[in-house]
Image: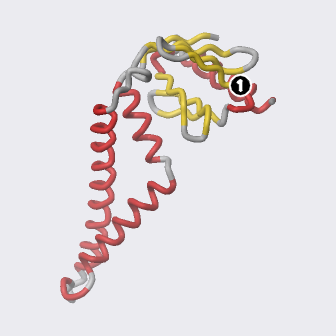
């Protein structure tokens, strides 16, 4: 099976956003900072006896968590925009071969053997084939002719990866 697609900036940004939201260390950091800011707001002389401290604490916690995630997403967009991503933001050809997953662009040719494929992740808008723990082939859903082809692609990779 061969899939041909062009990666766009939006695809790369969405992948990074979802990847970070699924990251346990990222979540612990944001939750920890949000708890800290909430604690600072309700600790000490700022609270009165009317019971508003719990409301303020929860509100500040939620607000800080959302702000921290939003800042990270904006930072990611700026970082991705500033980098020279011509190797990524180009046309890709991904082929499932008997020995592994082959990827080709105008700049690279790579063959990832089945035992080296770590996992596949599906999310809104893409399929990510992790060829190492921290590197993935990000294939937008629009690259597949149908949802059945997308599912077959994922099943083929998972079956070959687990069989080796």
Task: State which quarter of the image contains the C terminus.
Answer: top right
1 above or below 119? above
Asked where in the image residue 61 lies, by quadrant, the reply is: bottom left
Residue at left offset 49%, top offset 47%: 22
Residue 162 as seen in the image, left or right of residue 91 = right
Residue at left offset 39%, top offset 34%: 14
Compare residues 98 and 152 and report the one nearer the observer: 98
Residue at left offset 70%, top offset 14%: 97
Q: Which residue is mark 1?
A: 113
Residue 76 as seen in the image, left or right of residue 159 = left
**Place of residue 44 in the rendered image (x, y in percent of width and height, measured from the top left):** 24, 87
Compare residues 120 and 112 and report the one nearer the observer: 112
Residue at left offset 19%, top offset 88%: 45
The 10 Å Cα crowd at callout 1, few under 14, some 14 to 19, many 20 or more, is some
Compare residues 140 and 116 and report the one nearer the observer: 116
As drawn, the residue found furthest toward the right would be: 163
**Place of residue 9 in the rendered image (x, y in percent of width and height, measured from the top left):** 34, 26
10 above or below 21? above
- SS assignment at label 1: strand
**Place of residue 8 in the rendered image (x, y in percent of width and height, measured from the top left):** 37, 22
């Amino acid at each position: 099976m061969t899939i041909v697609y062009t990666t766009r900036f939006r695809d790369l940004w969405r992948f990074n956003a979802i990847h970070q939201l699924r990251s346990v260390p990222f979540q612990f950091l944001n939750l920890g900072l949000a708890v800290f800011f909430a604690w600072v707001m309700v600790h000490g002389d700022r609270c009165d006896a009317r019971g508003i401290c719990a409301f303020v604490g929860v509100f500040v916690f939620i607000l800080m968590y959302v702000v921290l995630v939003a800042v990270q997403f904006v930072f990611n967009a700026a970082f991705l925009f500033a980098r020279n991503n011509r190797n990524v933001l180009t046309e890709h050809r991904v082929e499932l071969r008997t020995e592994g997953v082959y990827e080709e662009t105008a700049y690279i040719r790579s063959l990832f053997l089945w035992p080296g494929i770590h996992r596949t992740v599906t999310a809104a808008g893409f399929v990510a084939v992790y060829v190492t723990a921290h590197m993935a082939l990000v294939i937008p859903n629009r690259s597949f002719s149908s949802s059945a082809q997308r599912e077959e692609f994922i099943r083929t990779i998972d079956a070959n990866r687990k069989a080796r």
